[in-house]
């Protein structure tokens, strides 16, 4: 438990938990917001589900990374990866704290520039960069992460047409033999060539790497790889950028996480109660009485996070042995380390609330809580989000409550596998229409990365905590959002 955690909230988690409870971290503002009357009003006014965002924790989350660098004498530049959440209030919060923004589309870039973020603090890392976004970035002077020779040719052509230089940060392909092939980045040799001779209409201002996963060792290697390139070529750059993927925790304690996986494995092998709908594996599968595979979910508890994780990277030497650490080399070369955290900046910034519209009991006795939302409105690219939602029972004494029950949360799509979370839940106080289910810590990816208006159901509204009240995020006022 850290200074930001709200501490145990007696009673709050009593009405619902997984068979093995996975109680999520809660900040004080989140505990305050978990009030049925207030949330029911918001759901009536804005529809279900509704996303609730407090941008404030972003500032301290970013400061923790800057401080970890400063301890080792390294200047850390933060560019908030807005793909993790589209709310403009978060862009404003990051900018007000002096940070930059990592953008992945033309609309993201246009909005960020319109909010007054200095172009020098913006990086365009979009995986696809049509002419329109290149033109906007180049004319504004925004650094562009370059991912292919074709992209570079388009950048040169656009800069030439505008009669200016484009600022680029070539993305280095991770050439780590133990890792699966990456679709991203340019071969190291091509990047070296660009540093030695950038060619027409481009200025190389930085180097860029982003690795999926959270591995410290791989990042140490790739950071040193970038520093090698700078030293070998004598290039004068402003930054080397290590992308995002800064790990966080959704759970305060490791024990529930370990217990859940133990119980899930037992359930898959038929040695204990099934933890998931139709015994879904969450990345694991049973073949010949053995469990294979790896969890396909975010590690809700992990040992090394945020500042400790960054310090270990900066302290790391290339082969893990003698030699200068990355921190020493960055200092010697006068280079800033740029990071593009998305999820890590949004820890503690979000809640998503939905209304129970109906309940039903299945032939096996399980109950379903039918929520006014769909799976894409609280889901990342992972198989599931393994943190217990909180059930706020309908306080109306006339509400018809089921008996204490076990079962699942389901949503709107016409698909058998359409569950909001695959985990089997316990409802010790039963279920009633008008109960509210609140998903905690959803600001990082859970709200928007895969959200869909399928079935022509409107996208969830995004409300920003302002003082004691809530205001629609400015993005929700824009057309087609
Ligand atoms: C290039 C790049 N930068 C930053 C991020 C943000 O990663 P995270 O939210 O895990 O910090 C991503 C995520 O996919 C990315 O692709």
Image (tube, rainbow, N blue to C red):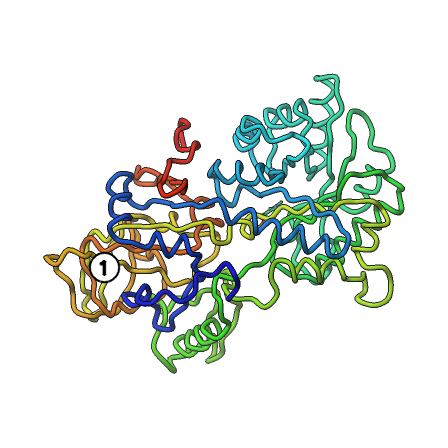
Q: Is residue 169 left or right of residue 421?
A: right
Q: Is residue 104 above or below residue 241?
A: above
Q: Give the quadrant of the C terminus.
A: top left
Decide: is 164 above or below 330. above
State which quadrant residue 178 falls in. Answer: bottom right
- Is 422 above or below relative to 186? below
Residue at far bottom of view: 271
Residue nearest the observer in this picture, 474 or 153: 474
Q: Which residue is mark 1?
A: 393
Callout 1 crowding tier (Cα within 10 Å): few <14, some 14–19, many ≥20? many
Give x and y (percent) for residue 179. 67, 60
Question: At which x and y percent is residue 103?
Answer: 58, 37
The structure residue drawn at horizontal position 36% and vertical position 65%, both measured from the top left corner, is 9
Q: Position of residue 453 (x, y in %)?
A: 35, 39
Classify residue 213 as left or right of residue 150: left
Would residue 305 be found to the left or right of residue 455 on screen? Answer: right
């Amino acid at each position: 438990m850290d200074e930001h955690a709200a501490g145990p909230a007696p009673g709050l988690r009593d009405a619902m938990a997984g068979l093995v409870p996975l109680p999520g971290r809660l900040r004080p503002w989140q505990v305050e917001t978990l009030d049925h009357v207030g949330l029911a009003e918001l759901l009536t006014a804005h529809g279900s589900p509704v996303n609730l965002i407090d941008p404030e924790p972003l500032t301290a989350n970013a400061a923790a990374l800057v401080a970890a660098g400063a301890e080792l004498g390294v200047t850390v530049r933060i560019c908030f990866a807005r793909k993790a959440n589209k709310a403009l209030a978060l862009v404003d919060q990051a900018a007000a704290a002096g940070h930059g923004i990592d953008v992945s589309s033309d609309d993201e870039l246009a909005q960020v520039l319109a909010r007054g973020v200095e172009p020098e603090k913006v990086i365009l890392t979009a995986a696809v960069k049509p002419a329109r976004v290149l033109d906007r970035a180049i004319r504004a002077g925004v650094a562009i992460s370059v991912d292919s020779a074709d992209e570079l040719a388009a950048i040169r052509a656009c800069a030439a047409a505008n009669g200016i230089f484009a600022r680029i940060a070539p993305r280095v392909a991770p050439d780590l033999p133990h890792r699966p092939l990456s679709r991203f980045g340019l071969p190291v040799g091509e990047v070296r060539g660009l540093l030695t001779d950038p060619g027409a209409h481009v200025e190389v201002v930085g180097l860029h790497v982003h690795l999926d996963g959270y591995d410290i060792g791989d990042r140490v290697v790739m950071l040193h790889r970038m520093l090698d390139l700078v030293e070998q070529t004598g290039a004068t750059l402003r930054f080397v950028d290590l992308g995002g993927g800064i790990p966080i925790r959704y759970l305060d304690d490791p024990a529930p996480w370990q217990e859940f996986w133990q119980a899930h494995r037992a359930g898959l092998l038929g040695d204990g109660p099934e933890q998931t709908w139709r015994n879904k594996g969450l990345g694991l599968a049973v073949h010949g009485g053995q469990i294979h595979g790896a969890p396909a979910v975010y590690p809700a508890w992990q040992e090394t996070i945020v500042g400790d994780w960054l310090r270990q990277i900066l302290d790391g030497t290339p082969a893990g042995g003698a030699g200068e650490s990355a921190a020493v080399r960055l200092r010697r070369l006068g280079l800033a380390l740029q990071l593009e955290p998305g999820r890590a900046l949004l820890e503690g910034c979000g809640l998503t609330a939905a209304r129970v519209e109906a309940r039903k009991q299945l032939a096996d006795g399980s109950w379903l809580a039918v929520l006014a939302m769909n799976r894409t409105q609280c889901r990342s690219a992972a198989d599931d989000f393994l943190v217990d939602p909180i059930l706020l029972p309908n306080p109306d004494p006339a509400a018809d409550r089921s008996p204490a029950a076990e079962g699942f949360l389901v949503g709107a799509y016409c698909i058998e596998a359409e569950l909001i979370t695959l985990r089997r839940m316990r409802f010790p106080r039963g279920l009633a229409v008008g109960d509210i289910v609140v998903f905690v810590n959803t600001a990082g990816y859970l709200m928007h990365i895969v959200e869909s208006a399928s079935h022509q159901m409107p996208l969830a509204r995004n409300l920003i905590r302002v003082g004691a009240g809530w205001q629609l995020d400015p993005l929700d006022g824009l057309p087609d959002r």
